[in-house]
Image (tube, rainbow, N blue to C red):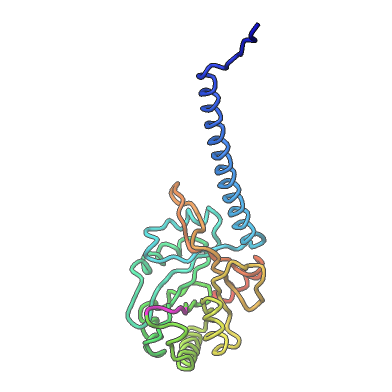
Amino acid sequence: MTKRQHYRPVYAKTRWARWRYRLGWLLVLLVIIGSVWGGLAWLRWRSDAVVSGFDVRGVAVSQNDGYLDFAALQNDGLKFVYLHATQGASYTDDNFASNYERIVGTSLGVGVIHTFSFSSTAAAQADYFEKTVGDSIGNLPIAIQVQYYGDYTDQTIAVRKSRAKLKALVTTLTQDYNRSCVVWSTPAVAKQIVKPALKDTDLWLDTAKTHQQGRRVMFMHYSDRAVYRQNGTRQEFAGILFNGSVTAYNKVVAQGLN
């Protein structure tokens, strides 16, 4: 007697193939979700680690940030704000005057920023800054931002001339305002221009290596995506950390009030 053979229906094989296909894609999706979540968690941890231990936090603002409610930013934890004011010998930030007028109504620390020009003389820059800013310099050190731009690179600038010009500008502003200056730059610019020209002036560095800086570094620009709230909305700013304790920061402010 011939033994009967049992066959699985074709539809059963097709159904299993479909489930196996779906399970495969589900596993791929879970792996992608896990990777994204892990990456975001790592970025959040890294961001938190950069600012951890620094209790005095601030931002640098310009006309690009629009209208700002400084009281709301203060309520969200800010301790100080630097306002972009002038650049070279001919440019003024459109929002500087209105920003300064509103911020003095808060208890925030206030500083002003002049962006250094490789093409203008130190005398012309100092004169333009003083005419534009007047006595509206706040209570923090005057910041001079030095950065490469346009055709001015580490390979094309006249290094010695630039060092002498920066030194002359810092000296002039320090003497005319009886206020110290702090020079903002990248570590590379600091090495090429700032440190050789200014042996004792405080530094402000673009760096996320916030726990590896010496006492000469007063401020650190750690991110362009520091988030603070104003008027119920979240906004990204150039995030700044003071490299020291609250007590040390208060001493800096007190010096600016004298």
Residue 87 in the image: above or below residue 223? below
Viewer-nearest residue: 150 or 130: 150
Q: Quadrant of the C terminus?
A: bottom right
**Which residue is depicted at the point 58% across and 51% down?**
39
Please provide percent x and percent y for residue 52.
65, 59
Please provide percent x and percent y for residue 107.
52, 62
Q: Quadrant of residue 214?
A: bottom right
- 227 magenta-colored: no
Viewer-nearest residue: 231 or 192: 192
Residue 21 in the image: above or below residue 246? above
For the stretch drawn in magenta, the main secondary structure is loop
Please provide percent x and percent y for residue 131.
36, 81
**Which residue is depicted at the point 43% across and 74% down?**
136
Residue 179 in the image: above or below residue 37? below
Furthest residue toward top: 1
Viewer-nearest residue: 32 or 202: 32
Viewer-nearest residue: 104 or 39: 39
**Which residue is depicted at the point 60% across and 63% down?**
56
Residue 168 in the image: above or below residue 90? below
Please provide percent x and percent y for residue 253.
57, 71
Looking at the rendering, the stretch of residues picked out in magenta corresponds to 146-150
